[in-house]
Image (cartoon, grey):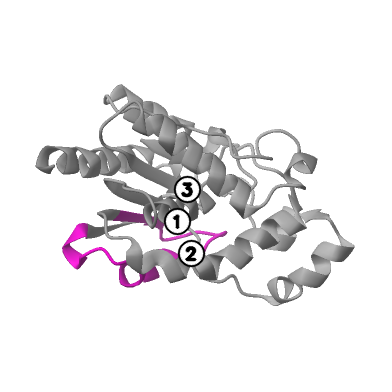
């Protein structure tokens, strides 16, 4: 199981889920995406292509350890998982509050200018709510965002959406009803964007978690649904 964290975050945000899945017998790869989990300035030279490359490298490591591979991603990690599934032979994909639609707002429109003037900006200015966890806690995300790095994700979104029809593997879409960082409309749109048959796509709405659902009240439910999703596919393969 490839488990991917989100933009400005770190493996801390998804480690509890990875550990639960490991206890169920799944092989796990939990990469730290380039520029993440250290210092905000380390994010400055990185771009979406770097994060995708690291996710793909982790996928290759996982393929060497197990016959079936699944990708699970939180937020941008979900975007990366979807992107991988358009080119790699995955047995299934799980997205959790994934970003796939274009982000709106004046800041986004001015982003090309802002990145030239301000190489780094507060995460809140980018519409990111740190520690968006209903029960409280710390996701270990940056307070500051490298603007060019963030804009590379924004620019990648239309390209990823354009490839989604080539994603035909089973898909589990998980999203929080109350999310202060990525609007639920992203997850609601996914079933119509992918090429997977309707009966291969399932959706779970979380009632008791915010954006970082993998550290929130619904973690046991997420663990159960992700595990049953993968186990059912393994049995039927």
Where residue 105 sits in the image (x, y, percent)? Answer: 66, 75
Mark 2, other Cα within 10 Å: few <14 / some 14–19 / many ≥20: some
Would residue 197 be counted in the magenta stretch? yes
* Residue at horizontal 77 percent and vertical 54 percent from the top: 122
Q: Can the viewer see residue 185 in this picture?
A: no
Q: Give the magenta-colored segment's residue range.
A: 172-200
The one nearer the camera, 167 or 30, is 167
202 horizontally vs 151: left or right: left
* Residue at horizontal 73 percent and vertical 44 percent from the top: 43
**Helix, strand or loop status at disc 3:** strand
**Helix, strand or loop status at disc 2:** helix
* Residue at horizontal 55 percent and vertical 44 percent from the top: 53
Where residue 220 sits in the image (x, y, percent)? Answer: 33, 37
Where residue 237 sits in the image (x, y, percent)? Answer: 13, 42
Q: Which residue is mark 3?
A: 74
The one nearer the camera, 187 or 129, is 187
**Which disc, if any, is residue 83?**
1
Observer-side mark, 2 or 3, equals: 2
Q: Can the viewer see residue 92 in this picture?
A: yes
Q: Is residue 220 above or below residue 174?
A: above
* Residue at horizontal 66 percent and vertical 60 percent from the top: 152
Q: Which residue is mark 2?
A: 160
Q: CA distance from mark 1 to mark 3?
A: 13 Å
Q: CA distance from mark 2 to mark 1?
A: 6 Å
Q: Earlier in the sequence, mark 1 or mark 3?
A: 3
């Amino acid at each position: 199981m490839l488990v991917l964290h989100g933009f400005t975050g770190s493996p801390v945000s998804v480690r509890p889920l990875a550990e639960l899945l490991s206890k169920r017998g799944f092989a796990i790869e939990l990469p730290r995406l380039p520029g993440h989990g250290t210092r905000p300035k380390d994010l400055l030279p990185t771009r979406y292509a770097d994060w995708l490359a690291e996710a793909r490298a982790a996928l290759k490591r996982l393929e060497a350890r197990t016959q079936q591979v699944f990708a699970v991603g939180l937020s941008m990690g979900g975007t990366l998982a979807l992107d991988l599934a358009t080119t790699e032979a995955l047995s299934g994909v799980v997205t959790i509050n994934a970003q796939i639609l274009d982000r709106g707002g004046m800041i986004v429109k001015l982003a090309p200018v802002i990145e030239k003037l301000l190489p780094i900006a507060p995460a809140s200015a980018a519409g990111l709510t740190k520690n968006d966890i209903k029960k409280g806690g710390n996701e270990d995300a940056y307070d500051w965002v490298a603007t060019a790095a963030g804009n590379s994700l924004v620019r990648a979104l239309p390209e990823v959406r354009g490839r989604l029809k080539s994603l035909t593997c089973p898909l589990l879409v998980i999203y929080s009803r109350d999310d202060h960082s990525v609007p639920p409309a992203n997850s609601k749109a996914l079933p119509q964007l992918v090429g997977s048959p309707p009966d291969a796509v399932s959706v779970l709405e979380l009632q008791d978690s915010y954006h970082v659902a993998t550290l929130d009240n619904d973690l046991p439910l997420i663990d159960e649904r992700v595990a049953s999703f993968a186990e059912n596919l393994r049995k039927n393969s």
